[in-house]
Amino acid sequence: MKTVTGTFEVTMLPPDTPPSPAGFVRLSLDKKFQGPLEGTSRVEMMATTDGKSPSGGYVALERFAGTLDGKSGGFILQHSGTMSPGAMQIGVLVSPGSGTGELAGISGSLEIRREGKQHFYTLHYTLDGPPPVR
């Protein structure tokens, strides 16, 4: 398992749909990663609040495209998180089988940390490659 760390920037996009009848909010975000993970991603999120409340929960899918340790390709990250004024629990996994290009066969998890307005990532991953062709 390899571990890489770096930073990323988040841009919240204007909502294109009103809240659902259940009160859920759909959000889209763009991210720009710097460091060993270099590239961009689009996040599609379903949340219990619009981000103005300090508490809530969310699930999201994120499609990354760029390079990881010099290898180009992409993969999907699958998020599940809860936030409250005193705590944040976020689980982010690389979706199995989602790797493309030189990142085919990637698996792992991503940790997110925030200090003030700066976001940091730690990606733990393996690149086992695609299964052998028979």
Image (tube, rainbow, N blue to C red):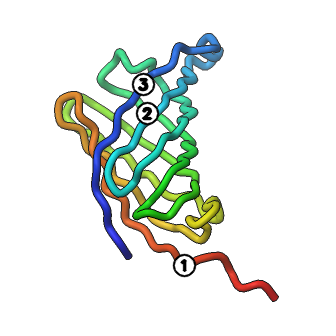
Three-letter amino acid code at the position of disc 1: Asp
Three-letter amino acid code at the position of disc 2: Gly
Numbered circle sitting on residue 128: 1
| C-alpha gap between disc 2 and disc 3 | 19 Å
- Relative to 85, 41 lies left or right: right
In the image, which is nearer the foreground, mark 1 or mark 2?
Answer: 1
In the image, which is nearer the foreground, mark 2 or mark 3?
Answer: 3
Look at mark 2 in the image and give the residue it sits on: 57
Instruction: Answer with mark 1 or mark 2, whichever residue precedes in sequence.
Output: 2
Instruction: Answer with mark 2 or mark 3, whichever residue precedes in sequence.
Output: 3
Q: Residue 91: x and y, percent?
A: 41, 51
Q: Is residue 131 above or below residue 87?
A: below
Question: The residue tagged with tag 3: helix, strand or loop?
Answer: strand
Look at mark 3 in the image and give the residue it sits on: 11
- Relative to 50, 6 lies left or right: left
Q: Residue 8: x and y, percent?
A: 34, 40
Q: Residue 125: x and y, percent?
A: 42, 68
Which residue is pictured at 27% across the width and 45% down the height?
120
Three-letter amino acid code at the position of disc 3: Thr
| C-alpha gap between disc 1 and disc 2 | 33 Å
Residues packed near mark 3 inside 10 Å, few (<14), some (14 to 19) or many (20 plus): few
